[in-house]
Amino acid sequence: MAAKWTVEKLIDFETRVADSFNSGSIKAPVHLSDGNESQLIDVFQNIKESDWVFCSWRSHYQCLLKGVPEEEVFNEILAGRSIALGFPDFRGFSSAIVGGQVSIAVGAALAEKIKGTDSRVWCFLGDMTAEIGISQTSIRYALNHNLPITFVIEDNGLSVMTDTRKTWGTELLNFELIKSDQILTYKYKSKYPHAGAGVRVQF
């Protein structure tokens, strides 16, 4: 699935979205990725077609890497669904609610364990989202019950425009203290603001 996508192709897609947003073709909010292309390509080398992928509002790359056709993803973004993309046929979902995907991902993992399948759940979330109550509870439950789920924490050091570690008054966040192969983390910096593409202001 991820084989067709290179760093350059992912950047080209996101640039296309950014240009469409800045021109006003996309009316609804968008949250763009940048600087994490190679990390995501590496993660998706281990994600099977039968696996589930749950994401936050920033999920364009994950949808493409999961195998959703490029034009299908772009048309959904153009239609205003960028922050809540859902492709059931590809087992890919995202949520516009902070932490909204996490407990659903754990539920899906529990279902796969009960059914005895070899499908795995991959839950992508940011560093600040990983610190909130629903995430902490969900991660603890999943680890304690050894559910078939991997939490991929995408650490850009920010919650919107606020430094995550300064907010919590700590150098190490909770997920950095947990030793588990069910938690993957990577750090990145993006050229884009939290929302939009840095040209057209939208509220």
Image: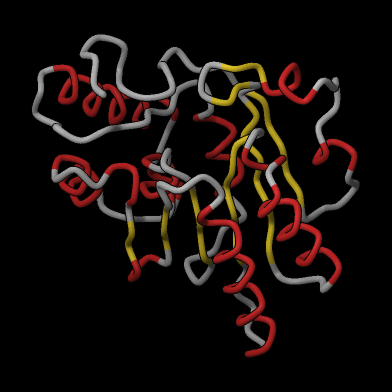
Q: Does 48 appear above or below 135?
A: below
The picture places residue 191, in percent across and down from the top left corner, at 44, 12
Give residue 189's quadrant in the image. top right
Q: Quadrant of the C terminus?
A: top left
Q: Residue placed at 55% from the left, 38% from the top? A: 40
In the image, is 52 to the left or to the right of 28?
right
Q: How many marks on residues?
A: 0
Tell me what residue is drawn at x 9 percent, y 28 percent: 25
15 with respect to 62 (left or right): left
- Residue 102, placed above or below residue 198: below
Instruction: Give the left or right position of residue 113, taking residue 81 as reference.
Output: right
**The image quarter in which residue 149 lies:** bottom right
Residue 22 location in percent, x, y? 17, 17
Q: Position of residue 184 (x, y in %)?
A: 73, 44
Residue nearest the observer in this picture, 180 or 171 = 171
Residue at image position (65%, 17%) is 163
Residue found 68% across the figure and 88% down from its top:
114
- Along the line of sight, the residue nearer the viewer: 5 or 17: 17
Relative to residue 45, is residue 92 depicted above or below?
below
| Up-down relation of residue 198 to residue 48 (above or below) | above
